[in-house]
Image: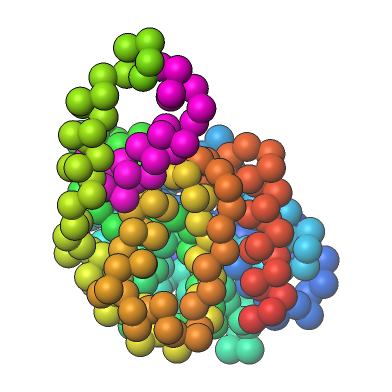
Amino acid sequence: MREQVSWHIGDDQIFATFDSPSDKNSQSVLLIVSGGNEIRSGSHNSHSQLAQYMREQGHYVLRFDRRGIGDSDGENIGFMQSGDDILSAIQYLRTRLGAKAKISAFGNCDAASSLLLNLDILNLNSLILSNPWTYDSVSHEAQANNKDENKPFAPSATAIKARYWARIKNPRTIIDLVSGKIDLTKLIKGLIHVSKKENLSDLAHKLNNILSDIQSPVTILIADKDSTAMAFMGAYHSKAFANVRSNPNIKILTLKSASHSFADAASKSWLYEKLSSSLLNQ
């Protein structure tokens, strides 16, 4: 069953969609947190479809519009300050389903980072994060949904480097070099540039501190050819993230894909499988 629900944060009304499985004794709950300025249905109705699938697998599902987004009242103050909105959704679930409910939260891109940044006030059983945002700038989702925040950002050196090496390993590149379609001098200069050490962003440092100490299960889903995911993995493999890599509560799963939101059929199927597995094993 699917129903439209709401609650208040102060004078602001929050609107949400709640899916109930046929098994009313289920204690498994998935909270879907939208990224950027994305409404609760998700890009191309992706969150609505995901909620239906997870409901059919026997899980309760809640997705909501944070303040200033979609149907909800209030001012949009950005993903880094969305902790109270996420907390209000969790409180709704606890009130409705009881203290025994096992709540896992899922977020992609800056929604993943928002969950981590506000983890200290959230009472969650586990986290499922995909392609976490590490740039100190506006996210893909914010760019796509708010023209006032349509600020370009430079891909990380990790992402650029990966593209350079992929091009070099392509046999077609040799032909293009010989024919003059690729400027060898520019290619070498580019490789030298991206080989320089990349400094971690302030946001990456914050995520590092949180992930190093996290005690609850965290599954991180990575589309390995996505620029945002490449930036996160560049930070993850850095010396600074040594404690994160050694944290036994963190599991990273990788898909060979460039789909930032796992939009194509194969990526979507993989995402659904990993989400279902994570909830069953919490």
The residue at the far front in this view is 178
Q: In which quadrant is the N terminus drawn?
A: bottom right
Of 8 and 238, nearer the camera is 238
Q: Considering only vertical position in the picture, is 160 above or below 211?
A: above
Residue drawn at the location 44% of the way across and 44% of the way down: 226
Q: Considering only vertical position in the picture, is 150 above or below 242?
A: above
Task: Give the quarter of the image for residue 150.
Answer: top left
Residue drawn at the location 31% of the way across and 41% of the way down: 160
Q: Considering only vertical position in the picture, is 209 above or below 63?
A: below
The residue at the far right in this view is 22
Q: Is residue 199 shown left or right of residue 90?
A: left
Of 9 and 208, nearer the camera is 208
Would you say residue 226 sits in the magenta stretch? no
Q: In which quadrant is the C terminus drawn?
A: bottom right
Q: What percent of the width, then of the height, locates residue 12?
A: 32, 59
- The kind of secondary structure the magenta stretch mainly shows is helix
Q: Is residue 171 shown left or right of residue 148?
A: right
Of 82 and 274, nearer the camera is 274
Q: What stretch is highlighted in magenta?
A: 153-176
State whether residue 121 appears in this view: no
Q: What percent of the width, then of the height, locates residue 87?
A: 40, 73
Q: What percent of the width, then of the height, locates residue 28?
A: 68, 76
Residue drawn at the location 63% of the way across and 54% of the way down: 271
Residue drawn at the location 57% of the way across and 77% of the way down: 103
State whether residue 272 appears in this view: yes
Q: Is residue 116 shown left or right of residue 220?
A: left
